[in-house]
Image (spheres, rainbow, N blue to C red):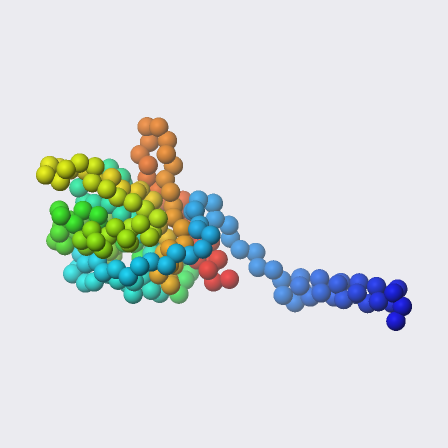
Amino acid sequence: MSKIQAGVIALVALVVGLVASVFIAPPQVGLQTQHVSLYPQARVLPDFELVANNGKKVTPLTLKNHWSLVFVGYTYCPDICPTTLAELKGIYPDLKKIPTDNPIQIIFISVDPRRDTIERLNEYIHFFEPEFIAASAEHVQLFPLVRAMGMMYSMSESTDNPNYLVDHSSSVVVINPNAQVIGRFKPDFEVGKLPVSEGQKILADMPAIIAGSQS
């Protein structure tokens, strides 16, 4: 076979391959996320056991077969926590309409187990949305879990003061149906503005996040 014949065969093969890639197996054009910060690789969470507002255990199995939006805080929080939960409550009906085999659930993790009893968590979360989950545990469970999710918390003053405050991350973490952390929605930090993850930004990106996992 001459070099010219070999070149022609190679060219024809290339053209056939291109045609097949376009018409036989067209590329998937996925939705694009605009607001979420996705991690390069999904993060595996450590084993943990929390107690929910209904008295049931919250473990990695609770996250399986669900898309979970997780936020950490405490019920005595004066601003960020109630505002974030209100944002999530506002978009929750639309979140439930997103096509997926793995329903979306909202989980609020209290990092103030000293004051946030099961009874208080139950009353607090029902004020926002009875379908939301509120859970807590001792710090030996909370610290490694919150850190693995890419967040933090610390007591900003002595707990001898009954009105002590707790510093905590204000992001909303996204956990996939395999119980892996894949990213988070981070608030914009602007002078004079409360750093809260905006519900509409979460709602805008969740369909693309879910669709991307199924492609």
Is 54 on the left or on the right of 60, as rendered? left
Taking 35 as reference, is 174 above or below it? below
Q: Position of residue 7 (x, y in %)?
A: 84, 63
Residue at the image point whose x is 31% and y is 42% from the top: 170
Query: What is the quadrant of residue 100 in the picture?
Result: bottom left
Is 20 on the left or on the right of 5, as rendered? left
Taking 195 as reference, is 207 above or below it? below
Q: Is residue 178 visible?
A: yes
Q: Is residue 129 visible?
A: no
Q: Position of residue 177 (x, y in %)?
A: 37, 62
Residue at the image point whose x is 37% and y is 59% from the top: 44
Q: Position of residue 195 (x, y in %)?
A: 33, 36
Q: Residue furthest top?
A: 192
Query: What is the quadrant of residue 95 in the picture?
Result: bottom left
Figure disc tally = 0
Residue at the image point whose x is 32% and y is 46% from the top: 151
Residue at the image point whose x is 25% and y is 60% from the top: 48
Q: Position of residue 79 (x, y in %)?
A: 24, 37
Is 29 on the left or on the right of 184, as rendered? right
Taking 18 as reference, is 149 above or below it? above
In the rendered view of the protein, which quadrant contains the N terminus?
Answer: bottom right
Q: Of 110 and 28, which appears nearest the observer?
A: 110
